[in-house]
Amino acid sequence: MTVRLRAHHLLCLLTYVGKGYSPAFTANYDGIAERLSRGEDILLVSGPDDICAPLLGEPEPHCLRDGAAGRDRQAAEDVEALLARPIRHGIRVDLDAAILTRLRQAFSTGHVRKACGGCEWSGLCGAVASGGYRDARLRRPVDAQNRPI
């Protein structure tokens, strides 16, 4: 299977530690982190994605606001520059160990954090990064025999 993600969630995934907007949101996010840790690929989408799904039943989900789209644009620009490859709607990304390591290093040093400006989770994400991503739910991808790939 494939996980559908908007661009700024490429950054959010790096520091996700099981906290979120609601129990349904975190349960869904835990499942996505597990799927990606098992090596599923990512399809970049425009607008709400698999992480947003539990929020879409709310009266005014924040994932439909302009701020989320702005975060997507900034994250796509930063990640595209870092990885030297297109990051836009319709592109597939294999989040292998090398890419995960590069993203986390760049996040830790602030090189891909412009999209995080004004985000309510920025402080938590900074603490997770400064702690070496120790409690992050996204782990190095593994194959069917649970070996790192």
Image: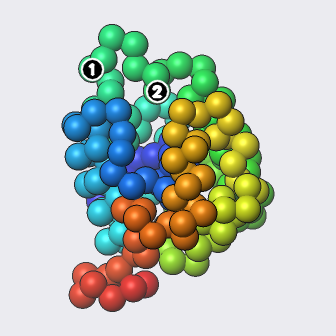
**Which x, y percent locates residue 54?**
28, 32
Residue 11's spot in the image, x, y percent?
A: 56, 51
In the figure, 65 relative to 16: above or below? above
85 versus 56 height, above or below: below
Task: Name the residue type under label 2.
Answer: Cys
Q: Around disc 2, counting alpha carbons within 10 Å, would you say few (fewer than 14), some (14 to 19), or many (20 or more)?
A: some
Badge 1 or badge 2: first in the primary sequence: 1
Q: Say if residue 84 shows up in the picture.
A: yes
Amino acid type shown at disc 1: Gly
Q: Cβ–Cβ below 8 Å for labels 1 and 2?
A: no
Q: Residue at x 64, y 40 (%)?
A: 116
Q: Which mark is residue 57?
A: 1
Residue in view at x 43 percent, y 84 percent? 149
SS under mark 1: loop
Please name the colour scheme applied to the rendered image: rainbow
Q: Position of residue 14 (x, y in %)?
A: 51, 58
Q: Residue at x 30, y 62 (%)?
A: 35
Residue 44 visible, this angle: no
For this view, does 49 lie left or right of residue 77? left
- How far across and down, in percent of the image, does residue 125 sit? 54, 50
* Image disc number at residue 63: 2
Residue plotted at (54% across, 66% down): 131
Q: Quadrant of residue 51?
A: top left
Give how far apart the Cα atoms at labels 1 and 2 are: 11 Å
In the picture, which quadrant includes the N terminus? bottom left
Q: Please determine whether, in this image, residue 94 is positioned above or below residue 76.
A: below
Question: Which dot marks residue 75?
Answer: none
